[in-house]
Image: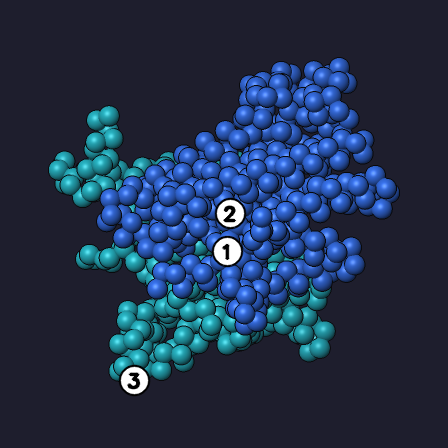
Chain colours: A cyan, B blue
Amino acid sequence: MELLLKINEIKSGKWTGPKWLWPVIMAGAVLFFTVRVATDSSGTYVQNLFSGISLGSILILVSLGLAIVYGLAGIINMAHGEFLMIGAYTTYSVQVFFTNVLHVQSSNWFFITALPVSFIVAGLAGLLLERLIIRHLYAKPLESLLATWGVSLILIQTARSLFGDLTAVKLPEMLAGGWKINENLVLPYNRLFIIALTIVVLVALYRTLTATRLGMQIRAVTQNRSMSACLGINTKRIDAMTFFIGSGLAGLAGCAMTLIGNVVPDMGQTYIVDAFLTVVIGGVGKLLGTITAGLGIGIFSKVLEAFFEAVYGKVLILLLIMLFMQFKPRGIFPDKGRTAAD
Amino acid sequence: MQLKPAKLINILFILFFAVVLPVGNMLGLVSVNSISLWGRYFCFAIAALGIDLIWGYTGIMSMCQAFFFCLGGYCMGMHLLLKATALQQQLLPEFMTWNDITALPWFCEPFHGFVPALILGLLVPAAVAFVIGYFIFKSRIKGVYMAIITQALALSMYLLFLRNETNLGGTNGLTGFKTVLGFELHKPGTKLGLYLVTLAMLCVAYGCCYKIVHSKFGKVLQAIRDSEPRVGYTAYRVLHYKLAAFVVAAALGGLAGMLYVPQTGIITPGRMDVKASVEMLMWVALGGRGNLKGAVIGALLVNCVYSYCTSVFPQGWLFILGMLYILTVLYFDKGFLGLFEKIGSKIGIKTNSERYATGSK
């Protein structure tokens, strides 16, 4: 009962207890992690943490596009995962093109080419989708959810009939092997590459959003669509550009995914629910929130998977998320100030 | 006595399915398999009624109806399985023996009797919905957030049911049923009986939902759909209303699942993945949201098309389903019934909803 009262106090913002409590808990958690890492002789713990971070990076790449698009236009794009799939199949096609048509022996060049190509192809597919369907559904999130679900079914079936059930991309030579830290601890290059790619994308996206004209316009439309239109911003064009960038990012994530897994038609479906959870926890349209939530979910899943089976880890994460939503229904970094409910 | 056209349609519907089809079967015109197929469609229609209640009337997009459907299905399946095991004079269902389990897990015990299984099949989904709904609605999660959370829930439960350790049959689910209440399941007579029971339950469920949405309670639900804050300001406890609607929808899902299992003879986790739930939403959207008849018609129609397409050109079904999703959302906002109303108003037939609309002005 006492505890319930306390929880209610925290929820309603009337927390009267010591202010130092939360920082102390956070510091304790950080301390715990450092001690665990430092005393970790077998390296499995660091390994788990590491694969958690790389899973988190992929989640971030996938959810960034989702978060921007939802924040801007109120669209729930269930077909977002399929842009990931398109990116992966583009990588595969580039590989086939390089080996069969250009007869390039080294497997490095195809991957370097595939990175920008998958971004552009997935982006263009997104643009097409926006022009044909999404344009009619702005600010109708639930309807857009159903329609884009249909799109995702069609895309998956198309991929299946074009490419068959299972294909794989060769690991480029330069990303084979790993960075050997000590006897037991090897950090694979492909995962390191994914983390590096994510950091580069994040920096580029941040620069785009804060320092370019397009980025300013995107943020303006996100904040107040009609006022931006009044000030002469072509909001339709901004919507299309944002959709292009968002789907392109998913395509890039798909290209990166080929480094650590097979290419299958429904590969996007595995990530889409996690990506949505990331967006929800991070707070809609918040870059920093998405990053924190993506990393958090990634690390938590991998660490919990080490303790429990993968499935129970997933169920536990969901329970944690529901608990979290009890306290922060608007995400980690909600908008300041009073907002009317709808 | 003069009959209204709406009532006439209901009576024709019941007459056709309760009299014409069984008589056709007795004369040898309709095979018992297609009768059983319709029985399964009716189960889906009951689940769709639940969705219509929670989505069409209350405006909450719940993406875990298929999970509730399966909860009911697993309850009934467990009962049938225990009966079948007892009939073969074994102690444990086969898959449990393979998993090296020596005693029946505690949660299987209540399912020995038929009546307890029936009650649990309704209670378990309702209780789960109550707990989930309480936490979700209390923290004022709604709209898209609600859809995503319930979707994640459906996914994690699907993964949980896939596991062998949960002792629910893993990927293969529960199967190998023999009898229900002593009647052998594979006999045509039992199939016909189950079909008629399902049809009766569909009528009862429809009647209940009709009563609910036309009661004061139902009006409040619709008010919540149209403007939730206003209902709150008028001193209604929005949480209680939403929770009640969610629980009733879940119980309907459970009922549908219970009727579904004896007719198909199998229940697997595949029935409860995210796809299945979205498909259920689709039935309602296609038939006509916020309209009970729409939900029933949508469920029956989509499943008929599904059976036809998968037998004629299996590759194309997903394309057709995908196109249906897109076209429904883009062009038939109110589903098929909305389309009929539009056509009807063009040629001069006044429908119920229009009468209300003009009356309120």
For disc 3, the neighbor class at 10 Å (few under 14, some 14 to 19, many from 20) is few
Residue sitting at x 45%, y 61%: B355
**Figure check: A40 above or below B288:** above
For disc 2, the neighbor class at 10 Å (few under 14, some 14 to 19, many from 20) is many
Residue B51's disc number: 2
User: Residue beneath label 3, please?
Assistant: A232
Q: Indicate the secondary structure of the residue bearing disc 1.
A: loop
Going by the numbered disc 3, the residue's amino acid type is: Gly
Q: Indicate the secondary structure of the residue bearing disc 3.
A: loop
Give the letter of the chain under mark 1. Answer: B
Residue A208: name its quadrant.
bottom left
Mark 2–mark 1 distance (CA, rounded to whole Å): 9 Å
Q: Position of residue B217 (x, y in %)?
A: 38, 42
Residue A331's disc number: none
Choose mark 3 or mark 1, whichever is in front.
1
User: Residue beneath label 1, please?
Assistant: B289
Residue sitting at x 68%, y 42%: B40
Quarter holding the C terminus of chain A? Answer: bottom left
**In the rendered structure, which disc, 2 or 1, sits on the residue that comes first in sequence?**
2
**Figure check: B344 above or below A300:** below
**Label 2–label 1 contact, CB within 8 A:** no
Going by the numbered disc 2, the residue's amino acid type is: Ile
Q: Indicate the secondary structure of the residue bearing disc 2.
A: helix
Going by the numbered disc 1, the residue's amino acid type is: Arg
| Foreground residue among B41 and A44 | B41
Mark 3–mark 1 distance (CA, rounded to whole Å): 38 Å
